[in-house]
Image: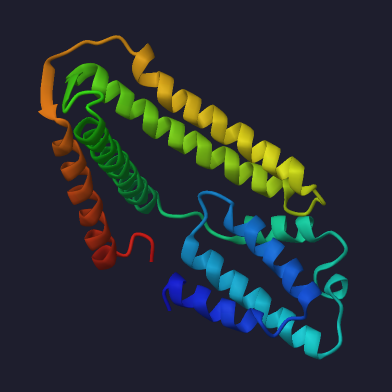
Amino acid sequence: MHSKEIIELNNHLREELTEENKKLYENMIIYIRTTSNKSEQQTEEVLLEILEHFVQAQKDGKTASEIFGNNIKEYCDEIIHEIPGEKRNKNIKFGLFIGIQYLALISFIFGVTSFGINYFFDLGSNVLTFSVGSGLVVIGCYLLLLYLLVKIIFKMIQKTTFLNIKKWVEFLLTWLFLTAYITLFYFIPKLIPSFGTTLSIPIIALGVIGGVLYLGTIVVDRKLRFTK
């Protein structure tokens, strides 16, 4: 089975757990899945094995502490250590796929929004002028920013999964990270000096290119199953 099919089976089987056990297992899922550089296929197979064992143990009247011990986080760390890492070429392909999809979505939203504002409110310009050199640097910075955001969010999730963090604290942390991300996203193009050949294209063309690229990534994903 592919990982997506395993996840669907996992979701169905999970309903056999009691509410308390289900919440505990879902915390284990979050903690283990947010570990980077591990094989997704192997991770989902291990999670399903744990669930099947948990369901059977529950039927036998055993408690979670009898199954996993008193330190669930330590148990999960041992499981993570045993899961093999994802293949390097697969990580590279997946990273390229996500990067292209991310840039395509940004281009589509920026192009269509800017065109709409200019067309309906006569604000801004219907032409985008940029320097190729600085544009490539900005794209690189955006991709690095996305990578760091994902890494930080995953690390934060792991650190707080088994802690009783209040909702307002979670909201505040999320708000701070997103505010920092949006601020950097806005100021990066303004801080990079212009260099290289200057080009001008219709702003709507940027939106069209972004839309076509995004649809292209969906088609490619269905054939090559980057996201399973």
Residue drawn at x 79%, y 90% as measured from the top left = 59
* 185 sits left or right of 169 in the view: left
Where 211 sits versus 28, above or below? Answer: above
Residue 197 in the image: x percent, y percent?
12, 15
Q: Is residue 60 left or right of residue 82?
A: right
Q: Quadrant of the N terminus?
A: bottom left
Q: Residue 77, percent across and down?
A: 70, 55
Colour treatment of the image = rainbow
Give the farthest residue toward the bottom.
Answer: 60
Q: Residue 122's image quarter?
A: top left
Task: Please report the residue visible at 68 percent of the width from the left and 66 percent of the height from the top.
Answer: 26
Residue 151 spot, x, y in % from top left: 54, 40
Q: Nearer the viewer, residue 207 or 78?
A: 207
Identify the residue shown where x is 31% and y is 44%.
Answer: 105
- Which residue: 63% across, 40% down? 174
Instruction: Tell me: residue 105, above or below residue 58.
Output: above
Quadrant of residue 79 in the image? Answer: bottom right
Q: Nearer the viewer, residue 175 or 213?
A: 175
Residue 60 pos. (x, y %): 83, 90
